[in-house]
Image (tube, rainbow, N blue to C red):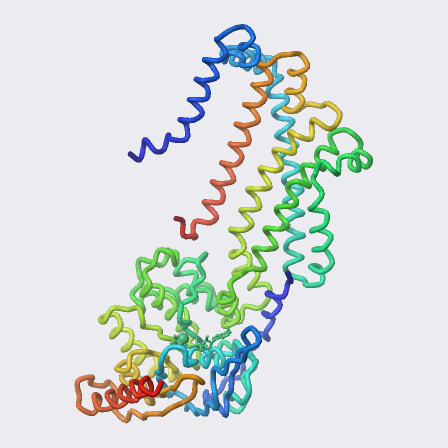
């Protein structure tokens, strides 16, 4: 028994100075130690992400996608290699980097409204402005009417949308999305894909999204990173040179999508 | 169906009362051990009218609530300090674990030495009874905050105190309420129980002892009923409060 669980929270509260948001990942390695054995989760990851770029990450379950996002957001400091944001190493979390966790991680004791407002707690804004922003983002993810609902009263997709609103509300420069649209119906999914695309253009924010849906990856991504598993590494990076808004039915679109699909299934075969 | 099942809890008590009643009317010997319920009602009436019931009941209740307030207040504080500071944890935890092994009654000689044989010793016992479960449950609740919620706090740069207020504390609330529930029960039991060990003074335990000394089984039974019903009521109140404070929790 120890009081250690709470000791790791005193990260510095200053956010990093304003920056264009270029992310450079250089020979990144991440290992986990599990009952004596060492598990290499990420191996030699090299990736440069430009300010304002949208990068999709696909790859089979367990290849280290969530781990990569946790490292970029600054939740884990124990890794080898460099993760540089505008040439500065990432040491802890920052309000400039937001994340939508894979399991939404809404706080169960807070209503939807409070959960979204939670992102604004440390911001120096008038209360009325915070209220306005929260309401605006509740509308954005179509949760009006559920502002006062607790997470247990939400469906999986609704909880995901609330988590997206929470990540967007303080307009981070870099937004990390871990399968944010996984539990949504097709219609809501397409609506939110468009919204993400719009927000990204409007805020000029950098977005990195993990998804299992290759079509979604191609629809949104400037580039699609295909990861291989065991150990997790970058297999291939596919550039998507199509202008927005993209036509999912176009030949060029389908060509890229099929190429990536073939890559992914190919990775399955070698295993 | 729903209304029927709501009253299921009354079936057993009513059956028991009927059995009791049947036994009490068999013969004189039986009616001494199993006091006829009408006698209990009569003595309840009498002791209510002459103020004895309310005097003793109030005394027990006041002791319980003050002991509960003192013990659980200090318990929450100590549990929190242990959870927040590793140093305090190392310092206090071993002592707490060791002292906890001694049954409350084992402290009676010491306590009577320190506080005498009167009301303050009883109050101390009650406070101690409420203190134990509060320390443990507060500590466990605060320590076991799910990592993912702490991650969220870290992502939004909440800092130590805001994290405590908005994340760690609410996540510990269910555990703290479990502690409060146990503390209420232990405080009430020890409040009545302590009257058996120290000098006589007002209280339901004492009322029972007096009744026993006077061979008044109706008054003994009345005391038992008063103790049981009051304990039940207190438990009910805490449960209600916890339902209000923990309404965010998924039930069932
Ligand atoms: N805290 C941890 N301790 C030990 N091993 C871990 C930890 N977190 C992740 N892992 C391991 O790292 C590997 C990658 O996990 P990760 O969650 O990053 O995969 P993923 O690509 O996001 O998978 P999915 O698509 O299923 O979400 C897994 O083998 C997992 O068991
Ligand atoms: Mg994942």
Give whichever of B149, B157 is nearer the camera.
B149
Q: Is residue A136 visible?
A: no
* Residue B50 in picture, x, y percent from top left: 61, 13
Q: Residue at x 24, y 75 (%)?
A: A190
Q: Is residue B51 visible?
A: yes
* Residue B213 in picture, x, y percent from top left: 68, 14
| Residue A253 placement: quadrant | bottom left
Furthest residue in direction right, as rendered: B113
Q: Residue at x 40, y 49 (%)?
A: B251
Give whichever of B62, A58 is nearer the camera.
A58
- In this picture, residue A72 sits left or right of residue B125: left
Give whichever of A108, A170 is nearer the camera.
A108
Q: Residue at x 54, y 28 (%)?
A: B228
| Residue B102 placement: quadrant | top right
* Residue A214 in picture, x, y percent from top left: 28, 82
- In this picture, residue A222 sits left or right of residue A116: left
Q: Residue at x 50, y 92 (%)?
A: A27
Name the quadrant of the C terminus of chain A: bottom left
Rendered-image quarter of ligand 1: bottom left
* Residue A222 in picture, x, y percent from top left: 32, 89
Q: Is residue A162 above or below residue B191?
A: below
Q: Is residue B153 above or below residue A266?
A: above
- In this picture, residue A98 sits left or right of residue B179: left
Name the quadrant of the N terminus of chain A: bottom right
């Amino acid at each position: 028994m120890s009081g250690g669980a709470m000791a790791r929270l005193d990260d510095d509260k200053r956010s990093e100075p304003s920056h264009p948001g270029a992310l450079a990942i250089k020979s990144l390695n991440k290992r986990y130690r599990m009952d004596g054995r060492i598990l290499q989760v990420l191996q030699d990851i090299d990736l440069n992400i430009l300010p304002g770029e949208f990068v999709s990450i696909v790859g089979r379950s367990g290849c280290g996608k969530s781990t990569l996002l946790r490292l970029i957001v600054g939740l884990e400091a124990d890794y080898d290699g460099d993760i540089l944001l505008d040439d500065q190493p990432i040491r802890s979390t920052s309000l400039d980097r937001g994340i939508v966790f894979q399991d939404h991680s809404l706080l169960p004791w807070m209503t939807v409204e409070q959960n979204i407002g939670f992102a604004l707690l440390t911001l120096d804004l008038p209360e009325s402005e915070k209220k306005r922003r929260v309401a605006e983002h509740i509308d954005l993810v179509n949760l009006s009417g559920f502002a006062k609902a607790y997470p247990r009263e939400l469906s999986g997709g609704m909880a995901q949308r609330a988590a997206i609103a929470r990540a967007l509300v303080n307009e981070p420069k870099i937004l990390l999305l871990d399968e944010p649209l996984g539990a949504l119906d097709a219609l809501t999914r397409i609506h939110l894909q468009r919204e993400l695309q719009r927000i990204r253009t409007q805020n000029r924010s950098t977005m990195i999204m993990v998804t299992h849906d290759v079509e979604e990856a191609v629809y949104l991504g400037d580039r699609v990173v295909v990861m291989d598993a065991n150990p997790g590494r970058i297999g291939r990076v596919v550039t998507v040179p199509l202008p927005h808004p993209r036509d999912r039915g176009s030949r060029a679109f389908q060509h890229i999508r099929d190429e990536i699909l073939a890559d992914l299934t190919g990775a399955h075969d070698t295993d | 169906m729903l209304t029927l099942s709501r009253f299921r809890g009354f079936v057993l008590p009513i059956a028991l009362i009927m059995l009791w009643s049947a036994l009490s009317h068999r013969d004189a010997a039986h009616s001494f051990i199993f006091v006829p319920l009408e006698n209990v009602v009569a003595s309840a009436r009498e002791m209510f009218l002459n103020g004895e019931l309310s005097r003793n009941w109030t005394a027990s209740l006041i002791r319980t609530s003050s002991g509960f307030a003192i013990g659980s207040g200090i318990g929450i504080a100590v549990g929190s300090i242990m959870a927040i500071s590793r140093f305090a944890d190392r310092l206090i935890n071993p002592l707490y674990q060791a002292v906890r092994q001694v049954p409350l009654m084992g402290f009676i000689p010491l306590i009577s030495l320190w506080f005498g044989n009167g009301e303050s010793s009883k109050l101390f016992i009650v406070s101690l009874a409420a203190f134990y479960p509060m320390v443990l449950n507060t500590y466990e609740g605060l320590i076991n905050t799910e990592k993912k919620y702490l991650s969220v706090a870290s992502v939004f740069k909440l800092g130590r105190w805001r994290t405590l207020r908005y994340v760690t504390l609410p996540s510990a609330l269910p555990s703290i309420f479990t502690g409060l529930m146990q503390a209420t029960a232990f405080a009430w039991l020890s409040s009545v129980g302590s009257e058996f060990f120290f000098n006589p003074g007002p209280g339901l335990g004492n009322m029972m002892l007096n009744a026993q000394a006077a061979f008044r089984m109706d008054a003994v039974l009345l005391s038992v009923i008063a103790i049981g019903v009051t304990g039940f009521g207190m438990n009910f109140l805490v449960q209600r409060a916890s339902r209000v404070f923990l309404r965010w929790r998924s039930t069932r």
